[in-house]
Every structure is written in structure tokens, then in C-alpha cells.
């Protein structure tokens, strides 16, 4: 499938969305803008989750009639594109690089994680194919600059960035789920008892050995850093 076919399948034309955005051409100048609509949708998703983001709710937040929003975002899919690029504008793109591509790539991973934790709906939104808006492109440009010292060709550099973003999104989604599960200590204790019983049954020696090994810090920051280091340090760039 070509990029154009993918865009048509989702109803989003990237060129129309980012290069030639439509603006209302009749009547009085509206009291809101595409940026204001997008910011309202982001605030709603941050507070209540993506399921709360409907055209009607967003229209209510900006004090507009729902039909008037369609001049800026004809459907929720387009609105999600705008939301993803809007929050991507929070990612710094002008800070100097260290020259050590692994260090700089890890910094990108930490920046992505912080962004997704501020906007917990973002990992879900990124699971669908998204267009590359101006803020997203600026951050991608920075990531490609980070990878310039490697021997990777252009396609491989794009794959590394996609792999990193996918890892961060999956890890943040897991963090969020674990934080929710921690609200039920009874279940956590029950799961620990179950694993202890399984490890002692003699049929899972590898698991028993792994569980008997010295533990490591389980706080989200330390866990993420270990996983990120393992991912990036293991990249083959030859």
C-alpha cells in the first residue's frame, strides 16, 4: 500500500491537513482557531482519556457549535492527528547534541517517555498510523541528525526511530497499567503467591532460577533506563 492509499483509507490527506489547511470562508471571523480546538481536545484527553474526546465535547469546551468544528477537523481521526502533532511541539529540537549518538538517542527516548507520561493517551493514539505534522517532523529531523555518525542508511535510521518510539510507547502503556494495578494490593500479593507456588513445583526450573536471582530496582524510572540502555546499546550499526 502506498502512503497516499493509506492516507485515503483513514480519511486524512496529509498535504491538505498540514500544507493547505482549510479555513472558514464565509460569515464572521470565528472566535476560535484550529490551535484552540486542538488544545481543548488535548486538555480533555489529558483529564478524561481519549474516549472523552468527541466533536461535541470539544465544541462545548471552546464554546462553538459542533458543526463549525468540521471546517477545522472534519472527523475525530483528523483531530487525533492534530492532537499528536500539537503535543509533539513540547519536545525540544534545538538543544546541542553531545556527539555520542547512543547518549543522544537515549536522551530522545527519555524525552518521549516524559511526553507520554504527561499525556497518557498518546501511546494509544500512536498505535494507529499517523501523518507527520510539522512538530513531529522537527523531532524526527533531530533523531536523524543524532544517527548521522552511524553507518546506517536512511531506511535503517527511520527504522531505528520507529523502533525506539514503539518501545517507549509500549513501556509507558505498561507503566500506566501497572500503576493502576498497584491500586489493588490484594491482587498483587495474590500474584506473588501464585508465582512462588509455580516456581516451587519443580516443573519450571528456569523460572525458579530467575525468581531466585537478586532483585533490581523496580521503580519505573530505573526500569525504563535499564530497558532503554539494553535496547540502544544492542543496536547493530555496522
Image: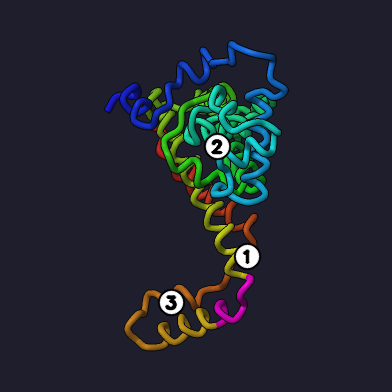
- Asked if residue 226 is among those painted magenta in the image, a careful observer would answer no
In whole angstroms, how far apart are the C-alphas of marks 1 and 2? 23 Å
1 and 2 marks in contact (CB < 8 Å): no
In whole angstroms, how far apart are the C-alphas of marks 2 and 3? 32 Å
Magenta part of the chain: 183-189
Mark 3 element type: helix
Residue that appears at 62% across and 42% down: 57
Quadrant in the rendering for residue 97: top right
- For label 3, the residue is 209
- For label 2, the residue is 102
Q: Pick whichever, 227 or 213, lies toward us.
A: 227
Q: Mark 3 packing: few (<14 Cα in 10 Å), some, or many (20+)?
A: few
- For label 1, the residue is 217
Q: Position of residue 1 (x, y in %)?
A: 27, 28
Mark closer to the chain start, 2 or 3: 2
Res 65 label: none
Quadrant in the rendering for residue 104: top right
Quadrant in the rendering for residue 152: top left
Q: Position of residue 59 (x, y in %)?
A: 63, 35
Residue that appears at 64% across and 39% down: 42
Amino acid at each position: 500500500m502506498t502512503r497516499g492509499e493509506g492516507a485515503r483509507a483513514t480519511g486524512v490527506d496529509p498535504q491538505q491537513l498540514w500544507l493547505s489547511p482549510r479555513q472558514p470562508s464565509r460569515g464572521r471571523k470565528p472566535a476560535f482557531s484550529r490551535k484552540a480546538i486542538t488544545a481543548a481536545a488535548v486538555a480533555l484527553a489529558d483529564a478524561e482519556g481519549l474516549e472523552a474526546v468527541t466533536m461535541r465535547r470539544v465544541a462545548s469546551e471552546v464554546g462553538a457549535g459542533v458543526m463549525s468544528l468540521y471546517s477545522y477537523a472534519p472527523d475525530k481521526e483528523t483531530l487525533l492527528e492534530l492532537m499528536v502533532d500539537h503535543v509533539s511541539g513540547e519536545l525540544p529540537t534545538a538543544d546541542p547534541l553531545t556527539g555520542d549518538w547512543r547518549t543522544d538517542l537515549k536522551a530522545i527516548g527519555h524525552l518521549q517517555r516524559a511526553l507520554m507520561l504527561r499525556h497518557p493517551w498518546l501511546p494509544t493514539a500512536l498505535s494507529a498510523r499517523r501523518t507527520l505534522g510539522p512538530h513531529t517532523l522537527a523531532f524526527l529531523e533531530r533523531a536523524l541528525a543524532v544517527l548521522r555518525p552511524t553507518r546506517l542508511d536512511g531506511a535503517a535510521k527511520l527504522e531505528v526511530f520507529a523502533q525506539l518510539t514503539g518501545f517507549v510507547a509500549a513501556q509507558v502503556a505498561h507503566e500506566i497499567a501497572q500503576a493502576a494495578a498497584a491500586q489493588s494490593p490484594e491482587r498483587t500479593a495474590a500474584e506473588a503467591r501464585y508465582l512462588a507456588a509455580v516456581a516451587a513445583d519443580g516443573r519450571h526450573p528456569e523460572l525458579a532460577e530467575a525468581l531466585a536471582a537478586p532483585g533490581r530496582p523496580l521503580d519505573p524510572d530505573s526500569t525504563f533506563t535499564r530497558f532503554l540502555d539494553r535496547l540502544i546499546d544492542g543496536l547493530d550499526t555496522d
